[in-house]
Amino acid sequence: MDKQELYEVAFNIINHKKLRRFGTAGHVACALETYKGNIFTGICIDLPCSIGLCAEQSAIAEMLKNNDTAIRRIIAVFEDGSILPPCGRCREFIAQIDEKNIQTHIVLPEMKEVLLQDLLPESWDKKWN
């Protein structure tokens, strides 16, 4: 699947919901493709108590539930259609799921693609690799 198709998968699952007490969900969606060719999606959950889940983490949880770990390409899309780079926490999360994921293609704004290793140039765990 190319990055435009993956973008469309993510964009099409955006469904912003208001939750209890100022919480929201679904205003960011993620789609990822694994090296096995599987597509997994997720949405963000933001709660006022500072507990939440990024869309990337949600998609990765779905991937793991289905016994897949190596991500070929990943994209996160905001409700206005803009592409969001993964936050630092998500970058580490992706990298720590599978050693191959340092080679994951990250889709950035304007459909630019970079490898995760370019977003994590000085990995804290290099001495254990």
Image (cartoon, rainbow, N blue to C red):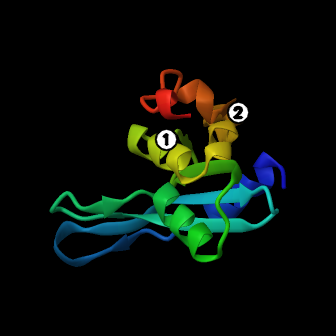
Residue at (53% x, 22% y) in the render: 121
Q: Position of residue 45 (x, y in %)?
A: 36, 65
Q: Is residue 69 above or below residue 112?
A: below
Q: Is residue 68 above or below residue 6?
A: below
Q: Is residue 129 above or below residue 44?
A: above
Residue at (30% x, 61% y) in the render: 52
In 3D space, how far apart are the residues under numbered discs 2 and 1 (Cα atoms)?
14 Å
Name the outermost residue toward the front: 128
Residue 71 shows up from this direction: yes
Quadrant housing the C terminus: top right
Name the outermost residue toward the top: 122
Q: Earlier in the sequence, mark 2 or mark 1?
A: 1
Residue 13 shows up from this direction: no
- The quadrant in which residue 66 appears is bottom right
Q: Position of residue 15 (x, y in %)?
A: 50, 71
* Mark 1 secondary-structure assignment: helix
Residue at (49% x, 41% y) in the render: 91
Q: Nearer the viewer, residue 115 or 69?
A: 69
Callout 2: few (<14), some (14-19), or many (20+) C-alpha neighbours within 10 Å? some
Q: Is residue 2 above or below residue 63?
A: above
Judging by the rendered image, the residue that carries numbered circle 2 is: 113
Q: Amino acid at mark 1?
A: Arg
Label at residue 110: none
Quadrant housing the N terminus: bottom right
Q: Amino acid at mark 2?
A: Glu
Judging by the rendered image, the residue that carries numbered circle 1 is: 91
Would you say 35 lies left or right of 119 here? right
